[in-house]
């Protein structure tokens, strides 16, 4: 009866074939539509095949989660195909429309993807934050039955150039990281060349400094067997001293060249020469390519030997392109076997014509292998996507009787929630990159405490030193404090925003960051949204309203980021009651899963839900008083409402978004002294208005003539001669498109350049977004009587 290792070797060869055939089929068999190379990274897949075989078919359990190296995607899909979780149709359409994706995707692929990958480094780092979230959930009274597994990243050695990996290492150390494996495919080749000599020594030092165990997997069974023979120590010393580039070149040239080189360097030494002579050219090449990361037996034993929960880095030495004709060549990263090479390789692999897609072709004992596959623990429970019930949303109110900023209102809303015992408040987890106090999370944290697996004392409290920050670290805490690294913030939000699917426990993650620094974490924000993670990102303070801090702390382009980012609904409320309505809606929006019919009222596909971005400010402004009408509430959610409805003869509409509301309102009053019927449009979300408008246009083009978006309904009654003046504390293009909705002439006002220090009034005047500038724009449009603000 075959052993587990025999079955693992059979699986390894099947995955190697299926992945490479899928890539070859896409590039050389499937008809080409545009003549562009499809690609697929055959060599990068080959270097991972042994690692993934030993990991998935021996080491992993269903509760474990894996981020697959992007360029190993073909191996992953081949594995899912072998297990019946992927279709031949989609495999045949690899990298085609509707086929398996170039890189594993939670939202685009049908197979069981834990973490989407693609932007290198991010899939690695998110596993450490997923582990922190797993510990967070397990520490709570409501999270005790959640599964506990290892968070595993399969890492390309070139990915170690990504800075976000090292930011994540530091954050993991601060949070006592555990249950995390990073397995480095150390093939020593990158896209443009060979990895520098001695890199592994630096890698080991870095991981050791942050408390990780480092396991070097360098030599496979064939090499270790040779090392035990007479002369083996000399061979081992030669292998360990051989430069990366030289080893790769020799691998590509094969057994005959290996023999000549080894005899030149080690021959005439009796025992070493005999060791080499005992092996044929093919056997010698197999031994020299039998590095630890290309040996399923070595890898299975190494993984099984880990009996602790400390974070562990496996440095697995591999040959890029292992087992194929392009193994070791420095150009093989994007290279493909040509038809001649592939035909020879197919013959060598023993796959008959017409059997290319057969999952178990060439397997000597298909019955036994099927039985083995049916008992593999990792796949035993089928799809590992969990679900959690939706949380009830309490009614959110806020006092609007005094001047208040939207940032202060945000803090007040969370503080009010922290005083209650509703389930929503219980599931909120907040986080911030060292700006907790200055983004108004302080009151929430004082009541709900900071999270740590082990309680930590506060020396200021112990010594009775007065402080507004009564921060206690405890397993019950609901705030995770991060260092100054916005990439880590976005990755943590991404991991927490997938908790309902990864761990079966829903969290409501809220992260705050200075709005200009949203851009620092933009790659990770995009990555989190691509995975359909659910969270609220609060960018505050925003715009030039953070006047005294100067241009580096004043955001200009972030409204455009909010509009363009898929999976993220962006809002910029001006008033506290708008924010209360939006946050109540957002808590529900985060929990929607796509069930139900499309929302034909807004044409925004709101049934699918997503993440939310709030752009808030520190500028306290006078509030409009209590408003409870449905037009206001629904308008705030849909993106806009009439703060001042235009009359039938309206020739000017002022449309504003965010904290410049007082300037627009003041300008409307002054203009109204000489003009009647002036309208004021309060825009709470240019993003939602624009998304609804484009969605309605698509619906109409498909034959639904009744489709009408919210912004079309708002502007449809304006006379054709009416002019629109838009104003925002941000880039003017955010609202400039409004004129295209119904064909009205539009003058956009906003901020296009870096700011400087000063008062808010100084900067508003400097950038021409104050009331006086608005009035002057209106005068220039209509050639009416000039009006000055005093």
Image (cartoon, rainbow, N blue to C red):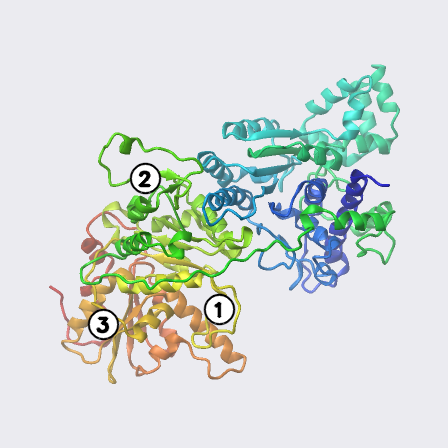
Q: Which residue is mark 1?
A: 607
| CA neighbours of label 1 inside 10 A, class few (<14), some (14 to 19), many (20+) | some
Asked whether residue 157 is in view, the answer is no
Q: Cα distance, mark 2 to mark 3? A: 51 Å
Residue 90: image location, x then y, percent: 70, 61
Q: What kind of element bears circle 1?
A: helix
**Residue at the spot 57% in from the left edge and 28% down from the top edge:** 204
Residue 400: image location, x then y, percent: 22, 63
Image position of 469 with respect to 572: above or below: above
Residue nearest the observer in this picture, 607 or 246: 607
Q: Which residue is mark 3?
A: 778
Looking at the rendered image, the quarter that the C terminus falls into is bottom left
Q: Which residue is mark 2?
A: 471
Residue nearest the observer in this picture, 100 or 189: 100
Q: Cα distance, mark 2 to mark 1? A: 38 Å
Q: Is residue 750 left or right of residue 608?
A: left
């Amino acid at each position: 009866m075959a052993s587990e290792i025999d079955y693992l070797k059979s699986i390894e060869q099947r995955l190697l074939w299926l992945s490479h055939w899928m890539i070859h089929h896409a590039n050389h068999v499937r008809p080409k539509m545009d003549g562009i190379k499809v690609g697929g990274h055959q060599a990068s897949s080959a270097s991972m095949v042994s690692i993934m075989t030993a990991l998935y078919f021996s080491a992993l359990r269903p509760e474990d989660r894996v981020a697959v190296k992007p360029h190993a995607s073909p191996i992953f899909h081949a594995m899912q195909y072998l297990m019946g979780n992927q279709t031949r149709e989609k495999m045949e359409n690899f990298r085609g429309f509707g086929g398996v994706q170039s890189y594993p995707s939670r939202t685009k692929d049908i197979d069981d993807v834990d973490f989407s990958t693609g932007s290198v480094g991010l899939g690695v780092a998110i596993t450490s934050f997923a582990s922190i979230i797993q510990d967070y959930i397990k520490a709570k009274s409501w999270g005790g039955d959640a599964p506990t597994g290892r968070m595993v990243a399969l890492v390309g050695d070139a990915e170690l150039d990504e800075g976000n990996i090292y930011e994540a290492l530091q954050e993991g150390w601060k949070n006592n990281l555990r249950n995390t494996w990073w397995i480095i495919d150390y093939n020593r080749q990158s896209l443009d060349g060979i990895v520098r000599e001695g890199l592994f020594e630096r890698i080991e030092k870095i991981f050791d400094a942050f408390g990780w165990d480092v396991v070097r997997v360098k030599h496979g069974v064939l090499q270790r067997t040779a090392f035990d023979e007479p002369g083996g120590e000399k061979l081992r010393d030669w292998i360990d001293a051989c430069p990366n580039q030289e080893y790769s070149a020799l691998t590509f040239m094969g057994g005959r060249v290996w023999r000549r080189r080894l005899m030149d360097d080690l021959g005439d030494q009796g025992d070493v020469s005999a060791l080499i002579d005992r092996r044929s050219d093919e056997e010698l090449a197999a031994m020299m390519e039998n590095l630890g990361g290309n040996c399923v037996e070595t890898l299975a034993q190494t993984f099984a030997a880990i009996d602790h929960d400390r974070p562990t880095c496996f440095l697995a030495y591999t040959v890029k392109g292992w087992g194929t004709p392009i193994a070791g060549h420095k150009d093989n990263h994007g290279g493909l076997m040509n038809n001649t090479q592939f035909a020879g390789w197919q013959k060598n692999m023993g796959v008959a014509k017409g059997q290319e897609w057969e999952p178990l072709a060439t397997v000597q004992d298909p019955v036994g292998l099927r039985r083995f596959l049916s008992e593999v623990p990792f796949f035993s429970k089928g799809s590992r996507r969990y679900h959690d019930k939706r949380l009830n949303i309490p009614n959110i109110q806020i006092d609007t009787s005094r001047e208040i900023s939207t940032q202060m209102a945000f803090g007040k809303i969370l503080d009010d929630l922290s005083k209650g015992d509703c389930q929503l408040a219980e599931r909120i987890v907040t986080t911030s990159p060292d700006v907790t106090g200055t983004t108004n999370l302080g009151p929430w944290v004082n009541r709900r405490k900071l999270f740590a697996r082990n309680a930590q004392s506060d020396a200021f409290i112990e010594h009775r030193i007065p402080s507004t920050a009564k921060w206690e670290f405890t397993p019950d805490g609901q705030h995770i404090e991060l260092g100054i690294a916005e990439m880590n913030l976005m990755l943590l939000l991404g991991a927490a925003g997938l908790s309902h699917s990864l761990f079966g426990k829903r969290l409501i993650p809220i992260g705050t960051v200075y709005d200009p620094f949203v851009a620092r974490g933009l790659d990770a924000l995009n990555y989190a949204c691509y995975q359909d993670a659910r969270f609220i990102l609060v960018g505050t303070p925003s715009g030039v309203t953070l006047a005294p801090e100067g241009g580096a702390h004043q955001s200009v382009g972030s409204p455009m980021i909010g509009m363009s980012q898929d999976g993220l609904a962006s809002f910029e409320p001006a008033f506290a009651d708008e924010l209360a309505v939006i946050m109540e809606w957002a808590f529900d929006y985060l929990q929607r899963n796509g069930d139900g019919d499309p929302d034909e009222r807004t044409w925004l596909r709101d049934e699918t839900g997503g993440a939310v971005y709030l752009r808030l400010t520190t500028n306290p402004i006078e509030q409009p008083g209590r408003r409870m009408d449905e037009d206001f509430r629904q308008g705030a959610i849909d993106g806009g409402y009439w703060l001042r409805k235009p009359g039938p003869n309206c020739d000017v509409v002022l449309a504003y978004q965010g904290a410049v509301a007082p300037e627009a309102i003041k300008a409307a009053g002054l203009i109204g002294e000489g003009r009647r019927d002036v309208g004021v449009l309060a825009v709470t979300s240019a993003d939602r208005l624009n998304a609804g408008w484009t969605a309605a246009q698509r619906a109409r083009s498909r034959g639904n003539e009744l489709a009408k978006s919210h912004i079309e309904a708002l502007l449809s009654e304006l006379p054709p001669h009416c002019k629109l003046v838009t104003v925002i504390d941000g880039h003017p293009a955010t609202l400039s498109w409004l004129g295209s909705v119904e064909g009205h002439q539009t003058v956009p006002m906003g901020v296009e350049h870096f700011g400087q220090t000063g008062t808010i009034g100084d900067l508003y005047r400097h950038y021409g977004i104050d009331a006086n500038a608005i009035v002057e724009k209106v005068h220039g449009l209509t050639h009416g009587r000039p009006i000055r603000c005093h």
